[in-house]
Image: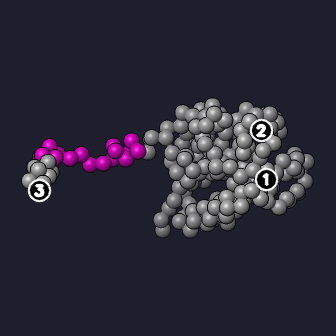
Amino acid sequence: MRERTIYFVFTDTGTYLSRLINLYTNKPLNHVSIGFDHELKEVYSFGRINPKNPFSGGFVREDIRGDFLKNSSCGVYTLNITEEEYINIRHHIKEIEKRAADYKYNFIGLIGILLKINIRRKNAFFCSQFVATVLQDAESIKLSKPTNFITAADIREQSELQLIYQGRLGDYPKHELAEEALLDRPKQSLFNTVSQKVKQFVLR
C-alpha cells in the first residue's frame, strides 16, 4: 500500500495570545498547522487572516516565509499515512476552504480548554482543534481527547510524528529535498554524455 507524508508545523509567533497559551500549557510552540509538501508551500491552519489584526481569525493558508511567521521559533514534523487517509484529509480541508468565509476562529473554545468545559461551536476552530478534526478519521494517528480539548502539544507529543527540523521558521531548508534528489541521481559517464551530444548534432 502506498504511503504519503504530511507535515506539521508547530510555531511560537510571539503574539499576546501565543504567550497566554504558553503560560497555560507550560510548553512552547502552541500554534500548529498542517502541510502537504516538503517545501511547505501548502500549509493550512486557523489563525490570523490579517497578520496585523489579532481579531481577524479564521481559516488560513499560511505563508511560512511571510513577515508574520518567518521569525517564529518552530518544529517541523512528518507523519506517514496511507493514500486513502491522505485523500480524505485533503478533501476535508478543501471543503472548509470552499466555505472559508463561513468559518471563524474559536476564541471561546480556548476558554473551554482553560476551564475544562466542553464548548462546541458550529464552523469555529482554534488551530489544534482544526488539525485534530481533519485527522480524526485517520488510523495512522489516534488522539486520546475530543477535538475541542486537543492542544498543539497533544499533537506534537504523538509518537508517530518524526521531527525533521527545529529552529527559525524562515530558515527552514526548503531546497533540501531537491538537493537530495540530485545527489541520488546516477552520474552519467563521459562516454554517454559525448554520445548524446553527437546524436543530437547528427539528427538536426
Q: Residue at x 62, y 65 (%)?
A: 91
Alpha-carbon span between mark 2 and mark 1: 14 Å
**Which amino acid is tagged 2?**
Asn
Q: Which residues, given as a range, are shown in magenta?
A: 178-195
**Which amino acid is tagged 3?**
Leu
Which label number is shown at residue 104? 1
Residue corresponding to mark 2: 53
94 in the magenta segment = no
How far from the left and from the top, in percent, is residue 54? 79, 39
- Location of residue 137 with respect to 168 vertically, above or below: below
Residue corresponding to mark 3: 203
Point out the tag, 2 or 1, that comes first from the N-terminus: 2
Q: Residue at x 16, y 46 (%)?
A: 193
Side (left or right) of 35 relative to 113:
left
Neighbour tally class for label 2: few under 14, some 14-19, many 20 plus, Cα within 10 Å:
few
Q: Residue at x 63, y 31 (%)?
A: 71
Q: Secondary structure at mark 3?
A: loop
Neighbour tally class for label 3: few under 14, some 14-19, many 20 plus, Cα within 10 Å:
few
